[in-house]
Image: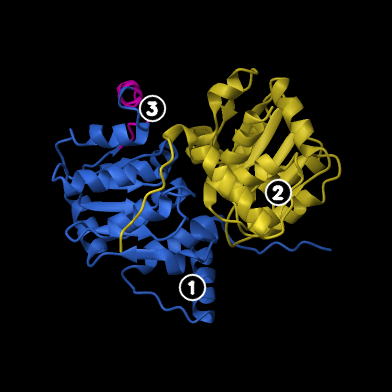
Chain colours: A blue, B yellow
Amino acid sequence: MAIELENVLPSEIEKRSFEIITEELTQNGIVLDPEKAPVIKRCIHTSADFDYAQNLVFSENAIARAKEAIRNGASIVTDTQMGRSGINKKRLAQYGGQVYCFMSDEDVAEKAKRDGTTRAVASMEKACELDEKLIFAIGNAPTALIHLYELIRAGKIKPELVIGVPVGFVNVIQSKELILELSDTPYIVARGRKGGSNIVACICNALLYNL
Amino acid sequence: MAIELENVLPSEIEKRSFEIITEELTQNGIVLDPEKAPVIKRCIHTSADFDYAQNLVFSENAIARAKEAIRNGASIVTDTQMGRSGINKKRLAQYGGQVYCFMSDEDVAEKAKRDGTTRAVASMEKACELDEKLIFAIGNAPTALIHLYELIRAGKIKPELVIGVPVGFVNVIQSKELILELSDTPYIVARGRKGGSNIVACICNALLYNL
């Protein structure tokens, strides 16, 4: 079998990829809301998984509010070093924000051990001490998302946006359903089991690239 | 609707997740080769995508050869900073290896521009200059995988293992089929469009955690 390569310039690969995604969505009768489309398509682009055309849930005006927060210098707190690595930090810095991930911090490890909880939970506690506008980008640990929900309900933190896309099999679905119950907090959530560090990073980037 | 959380100790979450994955594979009549199972299950664990039970292809003895290479101090070259971030570098270092990613190197960017190619291609060229045992872990750029194939065919490099799991829509499928044509190179390939930095990292970690 001869393997034939498609002749696409390096600089055109991403554009062509998004065209293919758009074509296949259309073929499957899926029409995306124009404001949400860049986020949804980038999730498909980063995973080659069309489930993201169905499982992403956005609170009303979530994208507009998130973009405004970024323009006003919001920082991003994530629970995954891989997510941190993937977020376009230069682009975010242009607006004054930075990316925090406390998961590998020694004080977080100590606190988690002391409290008998996860580092993810302890890292959410640490984020409460930050005195700035924050977007929470949870791509790994449902325990982080659950504790974030509790902190929001307790009035200890008021995120500009919660990106709730942990991945997995234990309390992942539930952690996301909790976020969907919040009425005053903008969110983008991938319902179900799917998500991950790649998804959390690409949602942040989709917002950054379409300001 | 009341949301009920499963009561699992933090330290038990990963174990419980793998149990659920095993149960669901069994329910679907999928029996995994015991040697490959840790790699396949970790891919499902990291993505919640059971497609990885079907799409991963292993050359004969790929896992045994990869583990031997790691034990003998092989390093890992990857085309993604997120992948680099996710690989357990401490564990790898115990055997003498390290993780290289040249994608952000200035000389790589310059060479790519000069040659009218991608940084991924230029970073594979740079890897040829390393004088050590190497595992290539390609999780993003099909152009990296295609060029790696060419370098192998030209006898310029002889990897201990090629992990071929770029993700996407342009030449991704083809790049993987090329690797499947290699007869003397051990490989682990995710056939089709799926893969990514999370998948490449978790395959490396599955090898490291089951030495």
- Asked if residue B178 lies left or right of residue A210, the reply is right
Mark 2 burial class by Cα count in 10 Å: few <14, some 14-19, many 20+: many
Q: What element carries label 1?
A: helix
Q: Name the residue under label 1.
A: A22
Q: Residue at x 77, y 45 (%)?
A: B33
Q: Which residue is drawn at 73% across and 36% down?
A: B161
Which image quarter holds the C terminus of chain A? Answer: bottom left
Q: What stretch is highlighted in magenta?
A: A100-113
Quarter of the image where one finds residue A129:
top left
Quarter of the image where one finds residue B192:
bottom right
Is residue A107 shown above or below B78? above
Q: Find residue A49 and report its horizontal and vertical position in percent.
A: 53, 62
Q: Mark 3 points at which residue?
A: A104
- Tag 2 near tag 3, CB within 8 Å: no
Q: Find residue B85 and report its horizontal and vertical position in percent.
A: 49, 34
Mark 1 burial class by Cα count in 10 Å: few <14, some 14-19, many 20+: some
**The disc labelled 2 sits on which kind of residue?**
Val
Q: Which residue is drawn at 77% across and 61% down?
A: A3
Do discs 2 and 1 share a chain?
no
Q: How far apart are marks 2 and 3 (CA)?
A: 31 Å
Chain holding disc 3: A
**The disc labelled 3 sits on which kind of residue?**
Ser
Q: Which mark is residue B189?
A: 2
Q: Find residue B30 and report its horizontal and vertical position in percent.
A: 71, 56
Q: Which residue is drawn at 59% across and 20% down?
A: B93
The foreground one among B105 and B182 is B182
Q: How far apart are marks 2 and 1 (CA)?
A: 26 Å
- Asked if residue A203 lies left or right of residue A29, the reply is left
Q: Of callouts 1 and 3, which one flags the residue occurring earlier in the amino acid sequence?
A: 1
Is residue A158 visible in the rendered structure shown here?
no
**The disc labelled 1 sits on which kind of residue?**
Thr
Q: Distance between the residues labelled 1 and 3?
A: 39 Å
